[in-house]
Each structure stands twice: as C-alpha cells, then as structure tokens.
Image (spheres, helix red, strand yellow):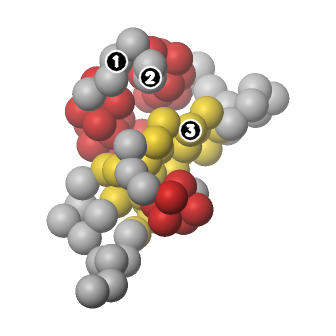
Amino acid sequence: MSTPPLRLWVADVGERAAFAAAATPFLMRDEARHNLQLAVLADAVRGRYPTAHLVAARDAAGAVVDVALRTPPHPLLVASGGDATSREAL
C-alpha cells in the first residue's frame, strides 16, 4: 500500500499567523526539543524576521508533520515528527 502524498505549505507573509496556528500544536508535542523553533516562529509572526521562510509538510488530513524555518542570515531549523518521506519533502 502506498503512502498518501504530502502537501507542502510555503507561507506568505500574510499567512504567518495561520501558519503558526497550524504548526504550534505540532511543535508543542515536544516543546523542550522545539523551543527554538517556537520562539523563532512567534518572532516571525510579530514581524521581527521580514524575510522569514516558513514551510510545513502536511499529511493527507492536513495535519502538520514537519516544519522548516529559515530566518536569513540564520541557519535552517527543521522540526521533524514525520518519517523520512516528509523530511525529504521539505
């Protein structure tokens, strides 16, 4: 049986709050491990990082399974809860 396709969500500036609302529950499942991603995401929503890149892999039901955040010039941050397929999609 094949795995259902993942969908990538690349958030526009106007979608940052909606992206945070979708990604935060996923990140909060392991808050200690994802505390940096949570802080960066909150700052991106507040406008601290105007060039932030916010990407999420979502499963067929729309649930976030991986998150990638990039706030130039800082390095890429990846929060993975999915399998290798979802990480590859990012």
N-terminal of the pair, mark 1 or mark 3, is 1
Q: Secondary structure at mark 2?
A: loop
Residue that carries the numbered disc 1 in the rendered image: 31
Q: Which mark is residue 50?
A: none
Q: Which mark is residue 34?
A: 2
On the question of residue 15 being in view, the answer is no
Marks 2/1: CA–CA distance: 5 Å
- Residue 47 in percent (x, y) is at 53, 25
- Residue 67 in percent (x, y) is at 47, 44
Marks 1/3: CA–CA distance: 14 Å
CB atoms of marks 2 and 1 within 8 Å? yes
Q: Residue furthest front?
A: 1
Badge 3, how many Cα within 10 Å: few under 14, some, many 20+?
some
Q: Is residue 21 above or below residue 87?
A: above
Name the kind of residue labelled 2 in the image.
His
Badge 2, how many Cα within 10 Å: few under 14, some, many 20+?
some
Residue that carries the numbered disc 3 in the rendered image: 78
